Image (cartoon, rainbow, N blue to C red):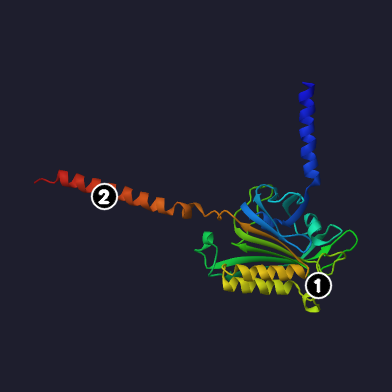
Amino acid sequence: MRRKGLVAAAVVMVALAAVVSAQDIQLPAVIYDNAAGEWNVEVLSSCRSPTYGTIKFQNTTARVEWEDEGVPDVLISGQSTDAPLSLAALAGFMSKDGKEYSYMTCEHQENYLSTPQRPQSVAQLSSTFMTMYTGVLSSSTRQWSCSSGVERNVVIEAFGGPLKANSPGQWKVQEALYWIEIVVETKDLVGTCAHMRSTAAAETTLESKRRSRKHRTSRGFNSVSVAAQADEALTESGIVTIRFIRRSGTAASWITRYHTIIVFTTIVVVFRVVHSFVSTRAAKTPL
């Protein structure tokens, strides 16, 4: 019994150590609450080679499963934008000294975009609902504010359908999104990993990232090489990107998923009722 107790205690200690060692990334709660399902994860940074993994959003936290060993353990959660949100898990991707950062959201925008070329899972839709937050980085040694003179160096974009806020105490997340991206500009950080090639590259900002996205969208999803080149150029200029791309299609409504079955069943039932009625009338009609 004592040995079993020691084994159980060891398992608990290992689990607690894993939780403690895991660093977090906090998304605005309304984005996290609409991201249920399985996603691919990409992290692009000049501090290390492109890093890939998968994640399944459920309940209040989700853990990234990396393809390669040695990548820091990352937990994703959703938090209110009323307070600073953590980017601690990106520390090793943002600077050489691994300093941890958080961010404060400053602006929030929502809009419908025309997107005729779309992933196959949502090919029937012709427009996309975009949710975007812009903000500023903060650290333990330096605090930024959302004043008009401070450059926004964090952009979070989410694409899919209109977002629905969960009720208080409700853990179930919705499936409204198929693309989430966090973009952080690190060129002005101390100890950045970015290697500036020229003054022009050093002046690259998040606006160029947004222009790159628009160009990529207009060319369609087949322009993989163009998108890869754009990502590489921005990475070398100090842009750190963590991207979530949905693997499983968003869940359709009950009526949409079972529309064909409902119609077929209705037709069969109506046919049988009419056939029975006609047969009964024919049997009662004297020859």
- Residue 102's tag is none
Q: Amino acid at mark 2?
A: Val
Q: Whole-percent x and y of residue 218?
A: 58, 73
Instruction: Tell me which corner region of the image, top left, top right, bottom left or bottom right, holds residue 284.
Output: top left
First along the sequence among labels 2 and 1 = 1
In this rendering, which labeled residue sits more in front, label 2 or label 1?
1
Q: Residue at x 60, y 58 (%)?
A: 176
89, 84: nearer the viewer: 89
Left or right of 124, for residue 263: left
Q: Is residue 36 visible?
A: no
Kindly give the residue lying farthest to the left in the view shown. 287
User: Relative to 173, is 223 above or below?
Assistant: below
Quadrant that contains the N terminus? top right
Cα distance, mark 2 to mark 1? 77 Å
In this rendering, is residue 62 above or below 224?
above
* Residue 245 makes an appearance in the image: yes
Residue at the spot of label 1:
196
Element under disc 2: helix
- Of the numbered discs in the image, which one, if any, rests on residue 274? 2
The residue at 63%/71% (across/down) is 226
